[in-house]
Image: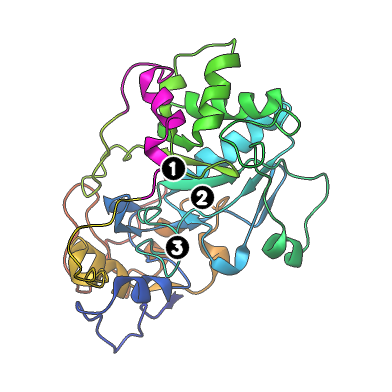
Amino acid sequence: MLASGLLGSAAPVLADQPAKQIFGAAKLPAILPPSPIGFYSKGCLAGGIAIPNDGATWQAMRPSRNRRWGHPDLVALVERLSREAAAQDGWPGLLIGDISQPRGGPMLSGHASHQVGLDADVWLTPMPNRTLSAQERESLSATSMLKPNTLYVDDRVWTAAHARLLMRAASYPEVERIFIHPGIKKKLCDTWQGDRSAMGKLRPYYGHHYHFHIRIKCPPGANNCRSQSPPAQSSGCDKSLAWWFTDEPWAPAKPKKNDKPAPKKREIQLSDLPAACAAVASAPGPATEAQVTFGTADPIGRIAGANAASAVTASASAPMPVPGRIPVPKPRPSN
């Protein structure tokens, strides 16, 4: 069974609507071949899947936000990290923050990125040895790794397991970069004794002392996805890191000489996103979240095949079409 499109089967998706209102209203993903469309901070997600609220080595936080959705490759990588870190790094399990909305796109609040299903936030607080209640998942605060009012890691909360978790995450070939606070980067530069070949993927940035932000590369064949320039080949334990410990990054912006008030920032419209995002916004969704949750073999393909007469599809090797309903091929014969 397919659910109606994002705005209902009869309501057209208007190109001049704020994109965050359209994609923020989506409760379920688009039944289209998995595809990140556009750039991390300007795009959308076709064929997203959800990571379950609970796994043996993870728990999802802030479930009311409905941001547990991602490209299947990212969701699989987060699950792998949770499992391997628990087995080999002394990390009991991940507390997973925001990944993406069901159809990606701009969010009603929070992130500028996380729009194409290739970004995931993971708390630097280890998972407790019990299942958190629904209320705890909404109200529990993550733990800062910094000494109060400083840029430096607090050794009372930082552990060797934190370092092992971050270095494991950076070691995966699919990972393009990981955003962390400059103080955490410095701690790793100063203390990590293992393989440092992935150190350069750990990128210092504002915030990110409560959680780290995984970003993976555009998957192979994702022709609608625009990659970010790869980080420098160096470890990043150099002058570029030292800059963060000067006054310059933290100095307030200097006021402009003219007295004119700054114009109100224009909201991103659906028409500002890649054209294929309109098709994502208007595509049918699954009947239930359970149908498109990690752990089900090829959930998007299975639903699309079962609903070949009413689903829409797009070629995985060519740009996605602009809005319009396109019948999917008949299900492939079983082997």
Q: Which residues are magenta?
A: 231-252
The numbered dot on residue 297 is 2
Which quadrant: the C terminus? top left
Q: CA distance from mark 3 to mark 1?
A: 16 Å
Residue 174 position (above or below residue 4): above
Q: Which of disc 1 and disc 3 is earlier in sequence?
A: 1
- Where does the image place residue 276, in percent across and percent down from the top left? 21, 62
Residue ID at (45%, 67%)? 109
Q: Residues within 10 Å of mark 3 (few under 14, many from 20)?
A: many
Residue ID at (47%, 40%)? 214
Indicate yes or no whether the magenta region holds residue 319: no
Amino acid type, label 1: Asp
The local secondary structure at tag 1 comes to helix
Q: Which of disc 3 and disc 2 is earlier in sequence?
A: 3
Residue ID at (38%, 62%)? 305
Q: Quadrant of residue 211?
A: top right
The numbered dot on residue 101 is 3
The numbered dot on residue 73 is 1
Residue 279 position (above or below residue 317): below
Amino acid type, label 3: Gln
Q: Quadrant of residue 132?
A: bottom right
Residue ID at (53%, 23%)? 186
Residue at the far bottom in the pictured view: 10
Indicate yes or no whether the magenta region holds residue 238: yes
Circle nearer the viewer, 2 or 1: 1
Foreground pick, 216 / 254: 254
On the picture, is 217 further left or further right than 49? left
Foreground pick, 102 / 266: 266
